[in-house]
Image (cartoon, grey):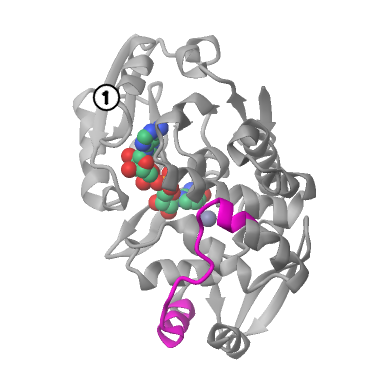
Amino acid sequence: MKLHVDLKENGYDIYMEKGILYRLNDHIQLNRKVMIITDTGVPNSYAQTVKEQCKEGYVHVVEAGESSKSMEVFQQLCEDLLEHNFSRKDCVIALGGGVVGDLSGFVAASYMRGIDFIQIPTTTLSQIDSSIGGKVAINLDDVKNIVGAFYQPKAVFIDTDTLLTLPKRHFYNGLVEALKAGLIYDEKLFALFEEEDIPAHLEEIIYRALCVKKAVVETDEKELGLRKILNFGHTIGHAIESYYHLSQYLHGECVAMGMLYFMSEDVQKRVLPIYKRMHLQSDVPYDSDEVFEILCKDKKASGDHVTVVKVNTIGKAELEEWKLSDVRHILKG
Ligand code: NAD
Ligand code: ZN
């Protein structure tokens, strides 16, 4: 299955196919130097499979986890490219989750002012969300994604077979972004989550979520308007994530919490049983004053207002300007 993200000269194809990891050569030119960036949590056999298809492939393994999205690791990767004499004609492949994708993308965007970048996402979160949209970044002094760029990949390869090795917690964490996509844009996608066996619908869930992201990103590449709807649940979600120092709860788990505040009661009634089946908590404990303080520091809050995304009808998002004091109010419950 192929989707084209139409961004004029920055456009690219997303290939979604079981086992495509073994057939990259049919779609892209690997007859050049290729730096495959992956992390210690991604099964080594995936990197070897990719390397075997390259004329001159190098594998660079970083530590698994958010701490690899750092200046130090960024520098090591750039040095590695330089040591191996990578030129503008060569390429970087991100093979892993969002951490590897964000980091590798920023390396590819920066090295020689930009070399070819290919995404092979291997987590639900990265297959559904982070590998599409062109946002790449690293963290600085615990501030997430503060140094980065918009840099589109040349291609994205989604092999859902790679998800078979993904721990269950990460599996459902990433699917929260698909549930979000259904809530804001695609009622049919949402309905798939109401089926008894969610994993049985995985292919269709990922495909439909990709279509939502594609449609929204194509309309608004640089997040000036419509793309804001993708932030549904993220204003409070991010703040809860930071409250726990990005360690105790995963991103999707916090977004799931954040979304609950901005949906009608009717929608909530349909969402809560889904959370249960996805093993998501709807009552992560936190100090509302502290979470509010973090939220105010977040870049999405400008002045004393914040743009919030609301879902009153499944499949349809609405943008509203809220006073920060209103957000404080709902946080207090
Ligand atoms: P992650 O990249 O840390 O991956 C989660 C864990 O799964 C890691 O331990 C990893 O080693 C392991 N793993 C990856 N693939 C595996 C596989 N196939 N089998 C077994 N283990 C595997 O986490 P994530 O949830 O994929 O991504 C989170 C990151 O994505 C955050 O840094 C976040 O900021 C970023 N993000 C970026 C965007 C964007 O638009 N660029 C959007 C959302 C999130
Ligand atoms: Zn998110």
Q: Is residue 81 above or below residue 323?
A: above
Relative image position of residue 112 (x, y in whole percent): 35, 35
- Image quarter where the C terminus lies is bottom right
Q: Is residue 220 magenta?
A: no
Front residue of 47 and 226: 47
Relative image position of residue 55 (x, y in whole percent): 34, 9
Q: Is residue 163 above or below residue 26?
A: below
Relative image position of residue 211 (x, y in whole percent): 70, 39
- Image quarter where the N terminus lies is top right
For the magenta stretch, what is the residue range? Answer: 274-296
Q: Is mark 1 within 8 Å of ligand 1?
A: no
- Label 1 Cα crowd, 10 Å radius (few <14 / some 14-19 / many 20+): some
Q: Is residue 287 magenta?
A: yes
Front residue of 266 and 64: 266
Q: In the image, 66: left or right of 262?
A: left
Q: Quadrant of residue 83?
A: top left
> Residue at coordinates 42% horizontally, 78% vertically from top-left?
286
> Residue at coordinates 70% horizontally, 48% vertically from top-left?
194
- How many marks overall? 1
Callout 1: helix, strand or loop? strand
Q: Residue furthest front?
A: 196
Relative image position of residue 324 (x, y in whole percent): 58, 86
Front residue of 190 and 78: 190
Q: Quadrant of residue 203?
A: top right
Circle 1 is placed at which residue position? 59
Q: Does residue 95 appear in this view? A: no
Q: Does residue 190 appear in this view? A: yes
What amino acid is at disc 1? Val
Q: Is residue 82 above or below residue 250?
A: above
Q: In the image, 327: left or right of 289?
A: right
